[in-house]
């Protein structure tokens, strides 16, 4: 898939505030600092679309970006009125940047609010076609991610795993880590979710991910 346009649309604190209409959405989530903003920028070929930040855990909103909608201006009113599908043309979709979780410096109350926001979006946003769960390829499987994956499975949420920062590992170490991760998942899952290996530095995985999104869009 070619990304012809990518534009920030709106940031929402709750699922009710997300854009109206039924455009298909693809959401991205992961622990703070996993490389989510970098991946979104790499995928869309826009260097500053999602804000990479030196302060992990800062984004606590659901950010929508309209992809291939040929929207000309960053105008919230205009975007809100783009409700029925088709008005923005075929092939348009939303890329959704969900807040990073697992940031240690948040209070218990902030964490609970964040969890409610994230889970509310995932459970209630019917047009979310797939959730991409980002995992840092360098790390051992983390409890917080495994629990989240289990919750996705229990709730029948369509998701895939995206290993990030592949360039930071040698080929051998990378392969070993991925196999180790998938083996860990196999303990809970009969069938593994699709997975992608990516690097925002080398653009590894860009076409695979975009093609995967395109395949799903074609079935919509
Ligand atoms: P976010 O908090 O998940 O949005 O993470 P960011 O995209 O802001 O990335 C966190 C840090 O990891 C930044 O210093 C990025 O430059 C770095 N980073 C992200 N992706 C990659 C990657 O694919 N390769 C390398 N080498 N560094 C990365």
Image: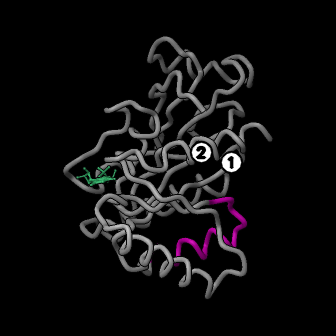
**What x and y, as percent, mark residue 115?**
48, 63
Q: Quadrant of residue 94?
A: top right
**x then y, percent, for residue 105:** 24, 67
The residue located at (76%, 37%) in the rendering is 218
Q: How is the image coloured?
A: one colour
Give the residues drawn in magenta, as a range. 144-159
Residue 102 occupies quadrant: bottom left
- Residue beneath disc 1: 129
Residue furthest to the left in view is: 54
As drawn, the residue found furthest toward the bottom would be 187
Name the residue at 63% across, 62% down. 194
Placement of 41 over or under 82, stated as above or below: below
Tell me which numbered mark, 1 or 2, is placed earlier along the sequence.
2
Residue 150, labelled with which disc? Answer: none
Q: Please indicate whether residue 210 sits to the left or right of residue 12 in the image.
A: right
User: Magenta stretch containing residue 217, yes or no?
Assistant: no
Q: Looking at the magenta stretch, what is its main secondary structure?
A: helix
**Vertical position of residue 128 compared to residue 81: above or below:** below
Front-most of 30 and 205? 205
Q: Position of residue 168 (x, y in %)?
A: 28, 62
Q: Which residue is mark 2?
A: 26
Dot 2 surroundings within 10 Å: few (below 14), some, or many (20 or more)?
many
Q: Quadrant of the N terminus?
A: top right
Do the numbered discs 1 and 2 sit on residues whose CB atoms are within 8 Å?
yes
Q: Of helix, strand and loop, which one carries label 1?
A: strand
């Amino acid at each position: 898939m070619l990304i012809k346009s990518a534009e920030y649309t709106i940031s929402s604190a709750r699922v009710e505030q997300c854009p109206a209409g039924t455009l298909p959405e693809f959401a991205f989530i992961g622990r703070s600092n996993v490389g989510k903003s970098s991946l979104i920028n790499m995928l869309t070929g826009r260097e500053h679309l999602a804000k990479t930040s030196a302060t992990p855990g800062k984004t606590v909103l659901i950010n929508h970006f309209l992809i291939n909608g040929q929207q000309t201006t960053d105008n919230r009113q205009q975007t809100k009125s783009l409700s029925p599908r088709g008005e923005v043309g075929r092939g348009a979709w939303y890329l959704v940047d969900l807040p990073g979780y697992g940031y240690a410096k948040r209070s218990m109350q902030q964490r609970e609010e964040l969890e409610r926001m994230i889970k509310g979006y995932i459970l209630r946003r019917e047009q979310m076609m797939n959730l991409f769960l980002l995992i840092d390829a360098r790390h051992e499987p983390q409890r917080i991610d495994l629990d989240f994956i289990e919750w996705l499975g229990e709730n029948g949420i369509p998701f895939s795993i995206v290993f990030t920062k592949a360039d930071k590992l040698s080929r051998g170490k990378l392969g070993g880590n991925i196999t180790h991760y998938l083996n860990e998942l196999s303990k809970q899952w009969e069938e593994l979710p699709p997975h992608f290996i990516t690097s925002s530095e080398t653009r590894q995985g860009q076409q695979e991910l975009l093609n995967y999104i395109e395949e799903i869009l074609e079935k919509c």
